[in-house]
Amino acid sequence: MSRLDPRTKLALQAGFAAAVFAHTTPRGLATATVLVAVAVFSVGVSPVALLRPYVFLTPFLVVGPAFAAARLGEPWLVPGDAVGPALASYRTLLLLAVGALYVRTTPVRESEAAVQRLVPGRAGRLLGVALGLVFRFLPLIRRELRATRAAMRLRLGAERPLADRMRLLTATSLVRTLRRADRLADALRVRCLAWNPTLPRLRFGPADAVGLGVAAGLVALAVLPATGG
């Protein structure tokens, strides 16, 4: 997957998303799981390491099915009502894995180039620059959050009430993030950030033909239920 053109990867993501939203049955999601497993194996990364940045979403994926099955009276629990939300949560997990694969295997500059090739004109250039800034700035924000939490633990901040910890973490992280944004803006000006920078050349190869064929097949699978109904 890492050798594919970024435009092919985007097409695969779109086709996969369409397919999993059209086929929400356990059989359909099982097939989607096989496809994701093949993609992860081709990249050679651990699924745990791939999804670790999204661990904060785990409570939301678990609470949804539990909340759907819970009742305020007799019967207190209806397991059958949790099936649909559980499948939806698992579908979200698969989509996160596919997105994480793209981020891990695609350099930022190639993503910028792909967006500018797909969206013509000034809108594409603006989206490409915005995408590059987001991909470069989000890791910095996460780093600031980790540094703030580490500093709070060293200063026994964990012994404070939860409300105080949240207030300190939010305020401190916001101040540090704004300072980081100012430094990033200065660095971009120093490096003469261009409105239309020279981006890497993108070329489709033999592997992309297979990838685009798979993407087209996934879109066809997504359309089949609609045409059949």
Image (spheres, rainbow, N blue to C red):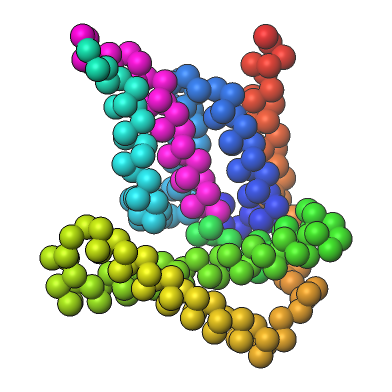
Q: Quadrant of residue 79?
A: top left
Where is residue 63? Give x, y as percent: 31, 34
Where is residue 158? Give x, y as percent: 17, 65
Please tell me whether the stretch drawn in magenta is mainly helix, strand or loop.
helix
Number of dots carrying numbers: 0
Taking the spot 55% from the left edge, 54% from the top edge, the residue there is: 102
Please tell me whether residue 39 belongs to the stretch shown in magenta.
no
Taking the spot 58% from the left edge, 61% from the top edge, the residue there is: 106
Furthest-bottom residue in this view: 190
Q: Is residue 214 above or below residue 100?
A: above
Where is residue 198? Give x, y as percent: 77, 76
Q: Is residue 193 above or below residue 220?
A: below
Where is residue 125? Give x, y as percent: 78, 65
Q: Is residue 187 above or below residue 221?
A: below
User: Which quadrant holds the C terminus?
Assistant: top right
Taking the spot 54% from the left edge, 84% from the top edge, the residue there is: 183
Which of the two residues, 86 or 177, is positioned nearer the viewer here?
177
**Is 196 displayed left or right of 103 in the figure?**
right
Which of the two residues, 88 or 182, is positioned nearer the viewer here?
182
**Is 119 displayed left or right of 96 in the figure?**
right
Please tell me whether residue 90 belongs to the stretch shown in magenta.
yes
Q: Which residues are magenta?
A: 74-102
**Is 107 displayed left or right of 228 in the figure?**
left
Q: Is residue 24 visible?
A: yes
Q: Is residue 143 visible?
A: no
